[in-house]
Image (spheres, rainbow, N blue to C red):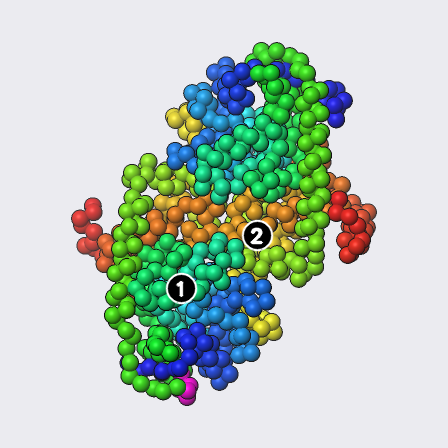
Amino acid sequence: MSAEVRAGRTSAMLPAAGGMDPAITGLLKTALEKGVVDAVLLPMEVPSGDSFAWILMKDPALAGDARAMAPVMPVQGALALRSLTRKGEGSLRVLALMRPCEVRAARELSKLGQVKTGNLLLATWDCPGAIPMKDYIADPAAAQERFAGMLAAGEPLAGGVKPSCMSCIDFSMTDADLHFCTFGGTGGSVPVLAGSPEGQRFLDSLGLEAGADLVAWEERISEKRDARLAARQTAFRETGGKVAGFQGMLSVFADCIGCRNCRAACPICYCRLCYFDSETAKPDPDAFLDAAAIRGGVSLPANRLLFHIGRMTHMSLSCVSCGQCSDACPVDIPVADVFSFVGHRTREAFEYAAGRNDGLPLPLRTFEKTEPAGIMEQVRDAEPGGHSHD
Amino acid sequence: MTSIAMAIEASAAVRELLEWLLSNGRADAVLTPRRSAETGSCDLALITSARDLTDAEPFQPVMTANAGQPLSAASMSGKRLAAVLKPCELRAFTERVKREQGSFDRVLTVSTVCDGVFPLERVAAGELDRLLPGCHESASGGETASGVRETCAACEGFVPMNADISVSRTEGGCLLHLHSARALERLEGFGGDRIEAEPDREVLARMLETRSAAKAELFRSIGGSGGLDGLVDLFGRCVGCHGCSRVCPICYCLACDFESAGLESDLPHFQAILAERGGLRLPPDTILFHLGRLTHMSFSCVGCGMCSDVCPAGIRVAAVFRRTGEGTAALFGYVPGRDVSEPIPVTVFKEEELGDIG
């Protein structure tokens, strides 16, 4: 990947003697002052001090109070971008600084026409993972300290981050318009990569010193990625064993209460009206009782497992493994583990990667004669003992 | 009132009653909480055959869903049901029936004095077996079982208001009090001694005292600074998932306004706010959603606590809604769920009303 980075992208150095976070927010503040962009989307601490919210800011003073890298992800950034651009992008030039999985989700939504990226400058940073909401709310100060440690170490802390972050291999995503190499921020500066001509123009207009030594950073990223890849293989193996077959799925989702928080937190779930909320899906009370007689009782609310399978069918190809579903689950079902695992397998079948800047269409929106064959091979491989999970 | 004395524990007695109702054609289906003997998972189930009642735990202090919600649809079938409901589930169902989202016509309701329920998070963490012992004993002694939802500890509506059958525990057994003609008719022929008995009011008075004190404390604790700043303090962490409204047994709109396309804004709208204030929160309307929901449903809020239990941001939604609801309902001298013939205040128009507000 070193060659790829050097070949396709240019870099600059952002002085960061006072720390990486203030350096990045400071740069964005300057960008607002100089009119390089019209607004910036950044996390900002809520007044109660125990969470963060996405704030779209035009006033440069606000950027000074914002956080470039929030320890938590209360709302997936793609959802903030969706609410902003769903009805069209207009003339407002916005820079959004987000975690890589948030930018990936935004790209998937843009393929679905729910985020308009034409006037967006998407910026990312090397992410060590996000702290679970419950942990953060319980003790924000301790969580901030833990996060600072993770950022410095360039890796997630087992038991201290959302489980999906432990096995995320796309934590450093250099194909965004701008990428802050926060795992390489040594010697009082942060390397910044431009991944597009727009990103390059942004850097140029702020007069950052061009050229950064990326060798150490690249090595570090590659080492961290290897560790997370190993964690991911382990996670997939474990999850694959748990969800095998109908009984496996039933037991993983046994405690589901049907609140649909997973769907609401999901940045991908794209249906305007979820089938499971539609009139069609409303159980006919009489059919219900017939089913109860056959099955020895109907568990209410009905169709809870079917809901998860339906959701999986719709969105797992685009799943960016952000872990928001698990974090929002009131009964601690490892939803994200299951969806990441299934998504990975379905994407393999279609040779698709969610959220890359590769211009590939969504697999389910294209038709290829040969596709089902590949899938059937996958199904055969998925038979017990038929393959290793990666 | 006419009561049936049974020499077995209340949950077992109700299981026996449900079995009898199904076996003797007095109910086509029963709605009851369950706990799987195999996995330990709790749920709510509609059961049609007596042999499938083995996992039924009628008075289990767990609420996976406020039963008033799923009972709505089930009660609209032509079948005769029996439903075991916690008092707040019965109140919620009553409120739904008032909005024509359910019917009492063929439903026999069974309830009991409620000890409160344990937060779902704790149940899911496998703590139920540790929490259960002594939970009922402490409640009937006038104490609140430790570890129940905070709205349960502060609930003054723990006595079922309009059940067909209420169950009270006695030394060595229980009493089934038959409150309605439907109860007398459906239970005709059901074993046990018919006696004249009343629930023990003294115990209930002790419980009420504890819970009223807890309620006052709960309401004080979410007092906040009031006004918009107070709301921002309370709801600032909200992630906009609307889980609170989905599990609310009262939220009655078939399509929530806050999920409609009409409330989505285009860029010029956001640009105007940016120009005026310099910044805005995305997704927007965080506080507005809660205010809207309060406007719609606080009159009918039964304080079940489902909303707090599912909140991924740990917001004490139920405490806020309960407190507001008590205030709005009091304006109209209204008690949600008390009587199905009492109309919901906002559904009736009186020429002279609320003079002191306007």
Q: Choose top left, top right, bottom left or bottom right for residue B179.
A: bottom left
Residue A130 point in image, percent of width and height: 56, 36
**Residue A175 appears in view:** no
Q: Quadrant of the N terminus of chain B?
A: bottom left
Decide which of B60, B307 is in the foreground and name it: B60
Q: Chain of mark 2?
A: A
The numbered dot on residue B106 is none
- The magenta stretch spans residue A211: no
CA neighbours of label 2 inside 10 A, class few (<14), some (14 to 19), many (20+): many
* Residue B135: mark in rendering: 1
The residue range painted magenta reads: B187-191
Q: Is residue B290 left or right of residue A118?
A: left
Q: Residue A4 placed where, x, y %?
A: 75, 24
- The label nearer to you, 1 versus 2, is 1
Residue B138 horizontal side relative to residue B12, left or right? left
Residue sitting at 37 percent across and 67 percent down? B137
Residue linked to disc 2: A333
Residue in front for this viewpoint, A338 or B272: A338
